[in-house]
Image (cartoon, rainbow, N blue to C red):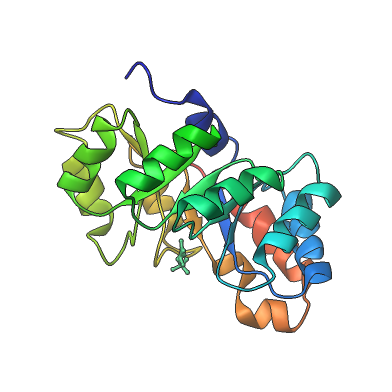
Amino acid sequence: MSGADPRVRAVLKLAPVVPVFTPDAIDDAVQVAQALFRGGLPVIEVTLRTPTAMAAIKAMVEAVPDAVIGAGTVLDAGQMEQVKAIGGRFAVSPGATDRLYAAARDTDLPFLPGVATSSELMRGLEQGLDTFKFFPAVQAGGTAMLSAWNGPFGDVRFCPTGGIGAQTAAQFLHLPNVLCVGGSWLTTRELLAARDWTGIERLAREAAVLAG
Ligand code: 3PG
């Protein structure tokens, strides 16, 4: 589809898995970015769900400049501008509004909005996009939904996220309309509480070789 921002697909093609990471302490966030990057996962979605999230993104970008660090759970235009200002490379949202689409255009930030229905997808197409987060993927219909969408929306590509784990990621990656999957299984609360950077790197290494 001509006109869509090619940077979004380029980012999503860098690795089969995009870790979804909710940061707390900033030093730990840097360790997580380094561990994921060492494990072979250069694209990281950092959710804006904690007070430290923006500062964590900034620190991760500075510490691992070759990684592609973006923000998730972007809910409004102000956050979109802030993400751009601190060096975030892309923005992900659980859904999308006209204002958020406009903010992505205004900030010139690659934008991956979440969709869960055909109408939401069609509104995104009207906004000129061709690549979406399918969220929450498992809860909203999983692989069967993506296969069904490949009929009417055969040119659209997805990053399904939500409810996907190491055991189920490959089922999604096999689908022709899936570029990569997102998930928080590489940075669980337990791994973060234990500051188990080696464990995170090992999970990243396993995820990096998942194939479609
Ligand atoms: C997200 O924001 O994308 C989800 O919280 C990630 O979903 P998961 O925790 O089920 O992987």
Name which residue lies at 78% across and 59% down: 35
Give the position of the N terminus as an image quadrant.
Answer: top left
Whole-percent x, y for residue 32 in the image = 75, 63
Whole-percent x, y for residue 207 in the image = 59, 54
Which is nearer the eye, 50 or 138?
A: 50
- Residue 42 horizontal side relative to residue 109, left or right: right
Name which residue lies at 54% across and 32% down: 108
Vertical relation: 1 (above or below) 108: above
Vertical relation: 31 (above or below) 154: below
Number of numbered tags placed on the structure image: 0
Give the position of the C terminus as an image quadrant.
Answer: top left
Residue 50 visible from this viewpoint: yes
- Residue 35 horizontal side relative to residue 128, left or right: right
Whole-percent x, y for residue 53 in the image = 66, 65
Vertical relation: 17 (above or below) 8: below
Q: Give the quarter of the image for residue 84.
A: top right
Name which residue lies at 79% across and 68% down: 26
Which is nearer the eye, 95 or 184?
A: 95
Which is nearer the eye, 143 or 77?
A: 77
- Residue 112 horizontal side relative to residue 119, left or right: right
- Residue 105 horizontal side relative to residue 83, left or right: left
Q: Give the quarter of the image for residue 136.
A: bottom left
Which is nearer the eye, 14 or 72?
A: 72
Whole-percent x, y for residue 45 in the image = 58, 54
Residue 13 visible from this viewpoint: no
